[in-house]
Amino acid sequence: MATSSAGERGHRDRAFAPQDVPPETGDGIDWLCGIPFLAVHAACLAVVWTGVSPIALAVGAVTLLTRMFGLTAGYHRYFCHRTFRTTRAFQFVLAWLGASAAQMGPLWWAGHHRSHHRHSDTGDDVHSPSAQGFLTAHFGWILSRANQRTKTEWVPDLLRFPELRWLDCNHYLAPLALGAALFALGEWLGAARPELGTDGAQLVVVALFWSTTALYHLTFAVNSLAHRYGSRRYDTGDDSRNLWWLALITAGEGWHNNHHRYPTSERQGFYWWECDLTHYGIVVLSWLGIVWDVRGPAPTVLVEGAGRPSRTHRAPSRPAWR
């Protein structure tokens, strides 16, 4: 297994790290967040009344993939790690796409993720399966009252954009706008093309609630599964793992051990055989001149990992819920 020095890891983890941050406080579930989260899941069952159609599934696939790109390319690789550059206008497009996935605002997401990299799989990592338990790592942490605050001390580089601050405070507008657009589209299709067998309610259930729920658990699986199962190419000082099948269904996010070794790389599938759909999308955007200064893994990191056997094992188990 390839190794990296503590100094290298420390430099990367501290890129956006604040100093002397007090611990989070506040126990219990924040129902203002918890009720909408649970309601989205429950609303998926409304398909019993709305039915499903091929056109609804097709629109749902589009909303899932575009919003996944907003999360993987936008929230994660751009806002959290600044792995490429773009215009201020497209920066907001990425932020809006990510927010439409109903996973809070870009500053909230980036602040928590940067904190995760600094404290990965320690007691201060709020979604570590080894430290907090599997279910807490998967989704329980987002319901905690202690984790609702935007960690502004971790995102000073993003705070200078008033439009991002506004969206972070009003992130719910993005999924609501998407829902309204889907309802209008469904009603129009129902009137103009009744043979398609769809309407506004059906598109909202399938293309919004179904795809949002899928995006929740695809995102959460990186926190839970990719810190417990899979192979390790690099000794990163935490439990991060590469999980190939998770990478396929999360547009490359499952190459998580790679990512923790060199988080400032836009490409998380470091080698040609590691499929990374988000990377391919960003490459196309770079060809179009929409993004630039796209950063890859350092050559020394590629040499470090090349030809080294990846060890597959399971992280130490902890109680499922804490």
Image (cartoon, rainbow, N blue to C red):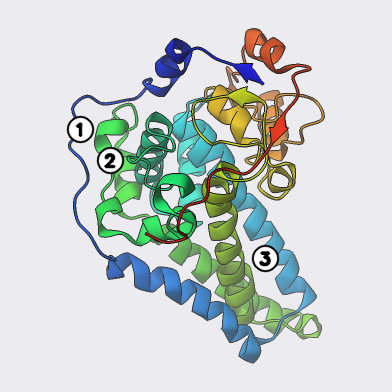
Q: Going from the N terminus, do you reach mark 1 or mark 3 first?
A: 1
Query: Looking at the image, is mark 1 or mark 3 nearer the viewer?
Result: 1
Mark 3 vs 2: CB contact within 8 A: no
In the picture, the quarter occupied by the N terminus is top right
Position in image of residue 48 (x %, y %): 64, 89
Position in image of residue 169 (x %, y %): 29, 52
User: For the residue labelled by badge 1, is the local secondary structure a helix, a strand or a loop?
Assistant: loop
Residue under label 1: 21
Residue at point 57% right, 17% down? 293
Mark 1 vs 2: CB contact within 8 A: yes
Residue type at tag 1: Val
For the residue carrying disc 2, how many other residues have a C-alpha within 10 Å: few (<14), some (14-19), or many (20+)?
many
CA gap between label 3 and label 2 equals: 32 Å
Q: Going from the N terminus, do you reach mark 3 or mark 2 first?
A: 3
- Examine the rendering and report whether any part of residue 96 can be seen: no
Position in image of residue 14 (x %, y %): 36, 21
Q: Is residue 180 above or below residue 288?
A: below
Q: How many marks?
A: 3
Name, please, the residue furthest toward the top: 300
Front-lying residue, 304 or 163 = 304
Front-lying residue, 61 or 298 = 298
Position in image of residue 20 (x %, y %): 18, 27
Query: Looking at the image, is mark 1 or mark 2 nearer the viewer?
Result: 1
User: For the residue labelled by badge 3, is the local secondary structure a helix, a strand or a loop?
Assistant: helix
Residue under label 2: 151
Residue under label 3: 60
For the residue carrying disc 3, how many other residues have a C-alpha within 10 Å: few (<14), some (14-19), or many (20+)?
many
